[in-house]
């Protein structure tokens, strides 16, 4: 057991939210390829950083060099990070960024021991979902007053994927990688499944005598390899997936339209390559270097990318709102319609919980940006405020559809009950017909003279038909026919009465006419 693992085991008694980190270090998940580490060194006199790949063996040496860097010319106790940054912006190195893709146990041990990292940083990156009442996520367990003093941020979000031509998929899948990241599949719609893949970017800044060290943890890239969570052990399956709406939108300044140079674009499938692209290809004047929190510098491009992913997430919510706006479907059967409504009801209930969780993730980022108080992030803060309000509004619209679906379920169930009642009535009529016939036939079957083909067979019909008619008349009296007959008789009586009155009136008028000439 390594030194950092022992430290985590000890801290678990004080902070129960570190339980999953301790389990990960004792029994790491190995479903991904070898973790990738990239170092980017920034210098004041160069527009592009120096990039190099680092193996796990070289990581320890790099961290030792950082911890033992010379502090000549800079008083690390008296000079704040912003002053040291300004002194080194001209020619010396002022920042080293370590990008780690697909975190593993060995990397946690090396980074945690060398940089004295708070275990909550790794625990928040690993743990993205609550699995039971006995386990709590670190972001829910830690109060804002403690989060404000931290030198790191964990950004949880969802990436939207599309699975086409894939029927009968489970509701949940696991992505490839050392960390457990779920993919939630939404119900089949328009010939495809839309998946919501859990992702996390974790950013940490450590100050040094000459230059600072930024650590950025990213997840394994999107591949076609997934695992069925319900299997034990999880079964591997290959599914072709693509980014919903082509991925997030670019956010850098547009190039000159007359320029002949074709600028590259980010990969979008691999977040590690995307961050390297933005740190390398973006002009120096577009980088958010100011005299504020270095953590806000490191978080600028990741927050921009995550904001674009939340925009696509909102598009999925808007499509769901349109999908669950109902119209009458006269061709669908009762059972088919009930099943569809029940599935939609479960999906809407999931959206209610999912929208609340998404708002919490976005609000957590907004709190960090307010604490940083970086004026260069004002526009980005407004973007996240817009995202939070839009997610809340779409969540409320989806929640308002729940009573409508519940009412539709009750209506369809009532229609089915009426149909079943009509079917029972038909069966009752058949029973009223066949029960008397069967009873009479059982009586006449005692004598062979009344059997079919003999001379007295006609007696069976003479007796059975009147008895059947009487039974039906008693069981289901023709009230409607009787009312019609009575109404008809009443109508005839009223008609005759009116004719009699009209005749009397005519006779009276004629007598009056005859009397008139006599009087004259």
Image (cartoon, rainbow, N blue to C red):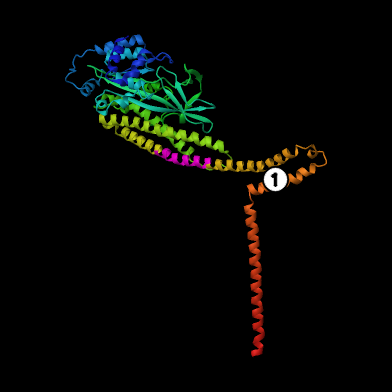
Residue identified by numbered label 1: 468
Q: Secondary structure at mark 1?
A: helix
Residue in the foreground of this view, choosing between 39 and 282: 39
User: Is 81 on the left or on the right of 510, as rendered?
Assistant: left
- In this view, the residue farthest toward the left is 78
Q: Is residue 267 above or below residue 62?
A: below
Whether residue 125 is visible to the viewer of this picture, yes or no, is yes
Whole-percent x, y for residue 259 in the image: 41, 29
Neighbourhood count class around disc 1 (C-alpha, 10 Å): few under 14, some 14–19, many 20 upward: some
Q: Where does the C terminus fall, quadrant-wise?
A: bottom right
Q: Which residues are magenta?
A: 396-413
Question: Would you say residue 171 sits in the magenta stretch?
Answer: no
For residue 99, what is the image quadrant? top left
The majority secondary structure of the magenta stretch comes to helix
Tell me the residue at 31%/19% (across/down): 18
- In this view, the residue farthest toward the right is 455
Whole-percent x, y for residue 271 in the image: 40, 22
- In this view, the residue farthest toward the bottom is 520
């Amino acid at each position: 057991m390594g030194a950092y693992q022992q430290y985590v085991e000890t801290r678990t008694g004080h902070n129960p939210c570190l339980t999953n980190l301790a389990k990960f270090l004792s029994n790491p998940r190995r479903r991904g390829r070898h973790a990738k580490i990239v170092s980017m060194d920034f210098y004041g006199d160069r527009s592009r950083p120096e990039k190099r790949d680092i193996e796990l063996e070289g990581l320890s040496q790099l961290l030792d060099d950082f911890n033992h860097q010379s502090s000549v010319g800079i008083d690390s106790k008296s000079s704040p990070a912003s002053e040291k940054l300004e002194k080194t912006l001209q020619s010396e190195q002022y920042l080293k960024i370590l990008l780690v893709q697909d975190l593993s146990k060995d990397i946690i041990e090396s980074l945690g021991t060398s940089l004295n990292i708070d275990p909550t940083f790794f625990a928040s990156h690993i743990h993205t979902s609550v699995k039971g009442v006995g386990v709590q996520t670190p972001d829910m367990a830690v109060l804002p007053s403690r989060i404000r003093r931290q030198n790191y941020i964990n950004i949880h979000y969802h990436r939207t994927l599309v699975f086409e031509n894939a029927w009968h998929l489970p509701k949940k899948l696991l992505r490839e990688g050392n960390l457990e990241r779920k993919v939630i599949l939404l119900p089949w719609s328009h010939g495809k499944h839309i998946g919501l893949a859990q992702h996390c970017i974790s950013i940490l800044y450590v100050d040094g005598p000459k230059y600072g060290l930024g650590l950025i943890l990213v997840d394994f890239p999107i591949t076609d390899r997934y695992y069925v969570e319900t299997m034990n052990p999880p079964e591997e399956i290959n599914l072709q997936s693509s980014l919903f709406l082509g991925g997030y939108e670019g956010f850098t300044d547009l190039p000159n339209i007359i320029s002949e140079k074709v600028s590259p674009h980010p990969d979008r499938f691999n977040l590690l390559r995307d961050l390297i692209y933005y740190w390398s290809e973006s002009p120096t004047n577009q980088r958010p270097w100011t005299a504020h929190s270095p953590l806000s510098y490191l978080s600028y491009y990741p927050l921009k990318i995550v904001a674009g992913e939340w925009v696509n997430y909102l598009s999925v919510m808007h499509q769901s709102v349109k999908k669950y706006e109902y119209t009458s479907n006269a061709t669908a059967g009762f059972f088919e319609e009930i099943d569809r409504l029940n599935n939609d009801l479960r999906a809407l209930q999931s959206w209610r919980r999912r929208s609340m969780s998404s708002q919490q993730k976005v609000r957590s980022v907004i709190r960090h940006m307010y604490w940083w108080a970086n004026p260069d992030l004002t526009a980005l803060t407004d973007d996240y405020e817009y995202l939070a309000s839009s997610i809340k509004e779409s969540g409320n619209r989806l929640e308002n559809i729940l009573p409508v679906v519940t009412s539709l379920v009750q209506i369809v169930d009532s229609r089915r009950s009426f149909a079943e009642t009509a079917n029972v009535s038909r069966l009752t009529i058949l029973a009223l017909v066949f029960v008397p016939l069967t009873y009479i036939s059982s009586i006449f079957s005692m004598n062979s003279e009344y059997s079919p083909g003999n001379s007295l067979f006609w007696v069976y019909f003479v007796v059975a038909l009147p008895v059947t008619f009487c039974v039906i008349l008693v069981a289901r009296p023709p009230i409607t026919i009787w009312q019609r007959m009575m109404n008809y008789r009443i109508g005839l009586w009223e008609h005759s009465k009116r004719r009699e009155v009209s005749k009397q009136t005519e006779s009276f008028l004629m007598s009056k006419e005859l009397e008139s000439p006599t009087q004259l």
